[in-house]
Amino acid sequence: MRRHTGPWAGRALGAGAAATALVAALVAGPFAGVAAAVGIDPSTTTLVSAPSGSSQVGQMVTYTATVASSPSGGPVPTGTVDFLDGATNVCPGVPLVSGVATCQQTYTSPATHSITANYVPDIATTYIPSSSGVSQTVNATMSSTSVVSDVNPSPMGATVTYTATVTPSSAPTPTGTVAFSDNGAPICSQTLLLNGSAQASCAVPYGAGTAGSHSVIATFTSGDANYTNSTSGSFSQTVSVATSSTGLSATPSGTTIAGEVTAYQATVSGSFGTPAGNVTFFDGTTVICPAAPVDINGQISCNQTYPTTAGSPHQIKAVYNGDPTTYSGSTSPTIPEAIAAGTPTGAVVAGAPQSAIVGRPFVTPITVTVTNQFGAAMSNVTVTFSGPPQTGPSATFGNSGVAHTSPSGVATAPSPVANGFAGGYTVTATVAGGTPATF
């Protein structure tokens, strides 16, 4: 066993300052000229990461090593720190500044990393090396997907391009596919690869029957382990209905005769095929034919018979209520339809044979009804009542037997009085242009 001699022989050496003195004496003695000091003061190294414990691909992680004396209160250690990821020195020889050294790393793929910080004292310190370690788990980056369109709202017949963007788009750039759906149904027929800007586009033409609100969703499926899958929120696309046009015609056109059937026909048209929906016919503000569907040609008819000329001319229009999936509503131009009285066809006796006392008025009025060629009552038509010659049984009439029909087409013989001869006879009602009636 070798024993120390010299000034330290027989002395008990303690830690701290005494140990430092011993090292100094040894360096001045048998280790004179040795380049490195022999550290004898304990140090502690503390390593932390930010974010702590876990991070995402593409996110920068900062490792911070803090070296201090042990126990605390001693001089601030100097030297460098080596940062190792497993056995790989990822940040070699980082100088301590006020006892702190840092190392920053950005990871491009998911993994768990075992990081060690090794303190390497320099020649001017009396501290011995120390180390510390942490485990850092790098997870796939949480992706986010959004979708927008190039025009909203869009007109019927237009092609709308939807663009999905996956974020973050920084390195590593996301790879994978995007599937688009519209109201739950797939569109673009297939999933689309992301381009180099982490985007994918889908062009959709909207034709007949597609008007309304469309809920478009983009679903991203990651092509590698660096990013998670994600689904966008619902993007609301509005496709506007197309413009319709409604035409109106009348047969007879312009003028019809009272009692005659007038056929109004509405025709609805548009640029995306034959419209569907209902048409209502109006005379001014009054409905004359309630809402009813157009046929396969977009047409519908409304027949009207005007019993008199009252209200002439009639203002007719057709209103199309639209088709919510294709066409907007439209209103035809208003067309006037005049009502003419027509031509009398004769007089029809109203009443029954009767008896009158000689020289006295008839007990029951004598009336006739005048109609035109369509059987409609004619108003303000002149009717002349007459009996046989006064040389035998007959009757006399006031106003020379002239009367005019009422709005309902009825004319009443004016003041008929039996003459002074007893016996049977016939009263005749004559209408210009019509067939006489006898009573």
Image (cartoon, rainbow, N blue to C red):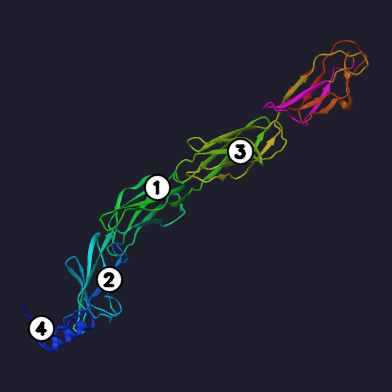
Q: Position of residue 415 (x, y in %)?
A: 89, 23
Q: Is residue 373 above or below residue 149?
A: above
Mark closest to the chain's N terminus, 4 or 3? 4
Mark closest to the chain's N terminus, 2 or 4? 4
- As measured in the structure, the alpha-carbon distance from the residue carrying label 1 to the one carrying label 2 is 55 Å
Which residues lie in the magenta part?
A: 366-390
Q: Nearer the viewer, mark 3 or mark 1?
A: 1
Mark closest to the chain's N terminus, 1 or 2? 2
- As measured in the structure, the alpha-carbon distance from the residue carrying label 4 to the one carrying label 3 is 127 Å
Q: Position of residue 316 (x, y in %)?
A: 63, 40
Contact check, label 1 and label 2, Cβ < 8 Å: no
- Looking at the rendered structure, the kind of residue marked 4 is His
Q: Which residue is mark 2?
A: 46
- Looking at the rendered structure, the kind of residue marked 3 is Phe
Q: Nearer the viewer, mark 4 or mark 3?
A: 4
User: Is 117 or 102 nearer to us in this picture?
Assistant: 117
Quadrant hosting residue 264: top right
- As measured in the structure, the alpha-carbon distance from the residue carrying label 3 to the one carrying label 2 is 90 Å
- As measured in the structure, the alpha-carbon distance from the residue carrying label 1 to the one carrying label 4 is 91 Å
Give the label on residue 310, or none.
none
Task: Classify mark 3: helix, strand or loop.
Answer: strand
Task: Classify mark 1: helix, strand or loop.
Answer: strand
User: Is 337 or 394 nearer to us in this picture?
Assistant: 337
- Looking at the rendered structure, the kind of residue marked 2 is Thr
Q: Which residue is mark 3?
A: 281
- Looking at the rendered structure, the kind of residue marked 1 is Asp
Q: Which residue is mark 4?
A: 4
Contact check, label 3 and label 2, Cβ < 8 Å: no
Does residue 63 show up magenta in the picture? no
- As measured in the structure, the alpha-carbon distance from the residue carrying label 2 to the one carrying label 4 is 37 Å
Q: Which residue is mark 1?
A: 182
Q: Is residue 50 left or right of residue 371?
A: left
